[in-house]
Image (cartoon, grey):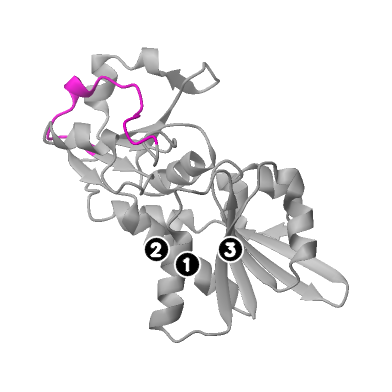
């Protein structure tokens, strides 16, 4: 039995297990299983690998997409530019274990954004500075869109939420939430921007997918903004993960 799964903490919000269970059932895949592995600390990661010899691949979610890199033997080239990993491929031979890192978030983000991005889209605000934000920035820059990060605390090359003036919001064509705010069970939370400044010219994209319509997206929708939920990204990156795990050339 080949085992796959998800690591992060907490994992009560995750749909990945359900998604892969459905995929295995639909496609008649009977030699695989997928389960959540909630790790309160990433220091437990080596034990997880050694204690589960049938584990062939993992997805990585909040808050470990950046920190996991120190446990990886090699990565695909894009990871160097992104600085975050969300897929691990685990190869075992005799007494040796080799772990390779990939980022399938880029595929999911691109699939979500392409239907909405036109030549008129020039500027994006990325709310949050974690692993997901890095994949978003990488993808937007490839599309020729200028990116500005927003953090709760003052950091180099970042705005804070207090810096988000009317002018900044009005010049931002896309606003992307890469924070866990709004995620189940805390569904009433959302990033602290001035939502009254939003209008039909804005596009709001939330990487949170549970619930599908987050408080962040709802506030934009009420003001006529176009919204992109996190579900399409989830599905696209999950399928890319499956391709990576089953590609013998990787």
Q: How many marks?
A: 3
Residue visible at 80% across and 67% down in the picture = 97
User: Residue 148 at x, y = what percent?
Assistant: 40, 29
Q: Is residue 249 at all visible to an observer of this figure?
A: no
Q: Provide the residue designation for mark 3.
A: 5
Give the overall secondary structure of the magenta segment: loop
Query: Disc 2 and disc 3: Cα gap in Å?
Result: 17 Å
For the residue carrying disc 1, how many other residues have a C-alpha within 10 Å: few (<14), some (14-19), or many (20+)?
some
**Real-space CA distance between mark 3 and mark 1, rounded to the nearest whole angstrom:** 14 Å
**SS at mark 2?**
helix
> Circle 3 sits in a helix, a strand or a loop, which is it?
strand
Q: Which residue, given by chain and number where applicable, does mark 1 sit on?
A: 240
Q: Give above or below for 188 relative to 7.
A: above
> For residue 196: magenta?
yes
Q: Earlier in the sequence, mark 2 or mark 3?
A: 3
In the rendered image, the residue lying farthest to the right is 95
Disc 2 from disc 1: Cα separation? 6 Å
Instruction: Examine the rendering and report whether any part of residue 171 can be seen.
Output: yes
Q: Is residue 219 left or right of residue 146?
A: left
Which corner quadrant holds the C terminus? Answer: bottom right
- The region drawn magenta spans 186-203
Q: In terms of sequence position, does the residue under pointer 3 or pointer 1 come before the other?
A: 3
Q: Nearer the viewer, residue 225 or 44?
A: 44
**Residue at x-position 41% and y-position 43%:** 141
Q: Which residue is mark 2?
A: 236
Query: If the image is split into quadrants, where does the N terminus sit?
Result: bottom right
Report if residue 12 lies within the magenta region. Answer: no
């Amino acid at each position: 039995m080949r085992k796959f799964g998800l690591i992060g903490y907490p994992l009560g919000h995750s749909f990945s297990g359900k998604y892969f269970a459905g995929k295995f059932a639909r496609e008649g895949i009977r030699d695989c299983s997928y389960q959540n592995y909630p790790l309160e600390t990433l220091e437990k990661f080596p034990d997880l690998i050694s204690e589960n010899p049938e584990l062939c691949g993992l997805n990585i979610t909040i808050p470990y997409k950046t920190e996991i890199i120190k446990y990886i033997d090699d990565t695909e080239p894009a990871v160097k530019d992104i600085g975050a990993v969300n897929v691990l491929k685990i190869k075992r031979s005799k007494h040796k274990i080799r772990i390779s890192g990939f980022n399938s978030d880029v595929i999911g983000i691109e699939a979500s954004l392409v239907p909405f991005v036109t030549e008129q889209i020039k500027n994006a605000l990325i709310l949050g500075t974690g692993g997901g934000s890095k994949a978003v920035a990488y993808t937007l820059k490839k599309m020729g869109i200028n990116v500005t990060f927003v953090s709760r605390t003052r950091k180099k090359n970042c705005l804070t939420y207090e810096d988000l003036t009317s002018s900044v919001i009005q010049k931002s064509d896309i606003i992307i939430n890469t924070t866990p705010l709004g995620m189940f069970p805390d569904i009433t939370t959302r990033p602290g921007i001035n939502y009254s400044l939003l209008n039909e010219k804005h596009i709001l994209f939330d990487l949170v997918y549970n619930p599908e319509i987050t408080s962040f997206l709802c506030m934009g929708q009420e003001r006529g903004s176009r919204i992109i939920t996190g579900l399409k990204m989830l599905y696209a990156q999950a399928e890319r993960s499956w391709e990576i795990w089953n590609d013998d050339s990787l």
